[in-house]
Amino acid sequence: MGIKLYTSHVLPRDGFVHGFPERSGGVSTGLRASLNLGKRWGDDEANVEQNRRLLAQHAGYDPAQLQATRHVHGTDVWKVGEPEVAECDGLVCDRPGPVLGAFAADCIPILFADPVARVIGAAHAGWRGTVGGVAKNVVTRMIEAGSKPGDIRVALGPSIGPCCFEVGPEVVEQFREAFGDVPGMVVPGPNKDHIDLRVASRAVLERAGVRPEHIDSAPPCTRCEADRFFSYRRDGREGGVHMGFIGMSQPARATRS
């Protein structure tokens, strides 16, 4: 089975490339079969590099242009062109060529694109990053690069859904402290409450000025769909890692709406 990309209808296609790869089409084996794109959990590095090359070839970008950092469940955002950093959870770019990567295996890989100012962003948002507002920080850095919030399009990638994200009361309390009583954010479960990270992420983005109609917040659940996606909660550190990606190529023809 070849590489399959989950893509979003809200992100522009003219002059942009993006995708959230599913798990098929790579060379890794075992629970990491087969398109594992992360190096941190013990896969053979040669397998990961080959998987990244296969993905780049399939999507049509230069693998040497990939910009990716080590994620630490934080809220820092790095802009391409600034002094390089090893660790951060958000990336922004305002020029064609570089492709931003956001890793995840239940956390949310978030992709951002402004077709008017031509600025892109990517973020890794687990529950800590969501509460801390990493998505808001990406929007802020995009504004610094010339974007207007109303022009920014955002897609949440495949991630753990409210059906599977059971948490303790201390986590629920942190979400309520950060967001208040957002409808649908806390979901009663059979044993403990569940959190809907998509609802919380939408709240972060809308409060940052992103238009509701410019947010795609209904991706598949990674834990539920084992044939399509990796999941840390399902497979632990023996499983694989996804990577959402976004880049710019030729100038897009767009007008501010």
Image (cartoon, rainbow, N blue to C red):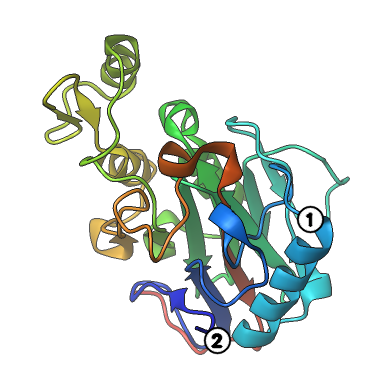
Assess disc 2: are there few (<14), some (14-19) or many (≥20) residues with their C-alpha within 10 Å of its C-alpha: some
| Numbered circle sitting on residue 44 | 1
Q: Nearer the viewer, residue 123 or 30?
A: 30
Residue 22 seen from this side: yes
**Residue at left offset 37%, top offset 57%:** 226
Marker count (numbered): 2
What is the secondary structure assignment of the residue under circle 1?
A: loop
| Numbered circle sitting on residue 113 | none
Disc 2 designates what residue?
Answer: 252
Question: Which numbered disc, 1 or 2, marks the residue closer to the eye?
Answer: 1
Residue 75 in picture, x, y percent from top left: 58, 32
Q: Amino acid at mark 1?
A: Asp
Quadrant position of the C terminus in the picture = bottom left
Q: Nearer the viewer, residue 69 or 226?
A: 226
Q: Nearer the viewer, residue 237 or 215?
A: 237
1 or 2: tag closer to the N-terminus: 1
**Residue at left offset 62%, top offset 86%:** 58
- Whether tag 1 and tag 2 are in contact, CB under 8 A, the answer is no
Furthest residue toward right: 83
Does residue 136 appear left or right of residue 168 in this picture? Answer: right
Task: State the image quarter where residue 216 is shown.
Answer: bottom left
Residue 247 in picture, x, y percent from top left: 63, 73
**Residue at left offset 88%, top offset 45%:** 83
Q: Nearer the viewer, residue 80 or 68?
A: 68
Distance from label 1 to label 2 (Cα)? 38 Å
Residue 244 in picture, x, y percent from top left: 54, 62
Q: Amino acid at mark 2?
A: Ala
Residue 45 in picture, x, y percent from top left: 81, 57
Does residue 41 appear left or right of residue 122 in this picture? Answer: right
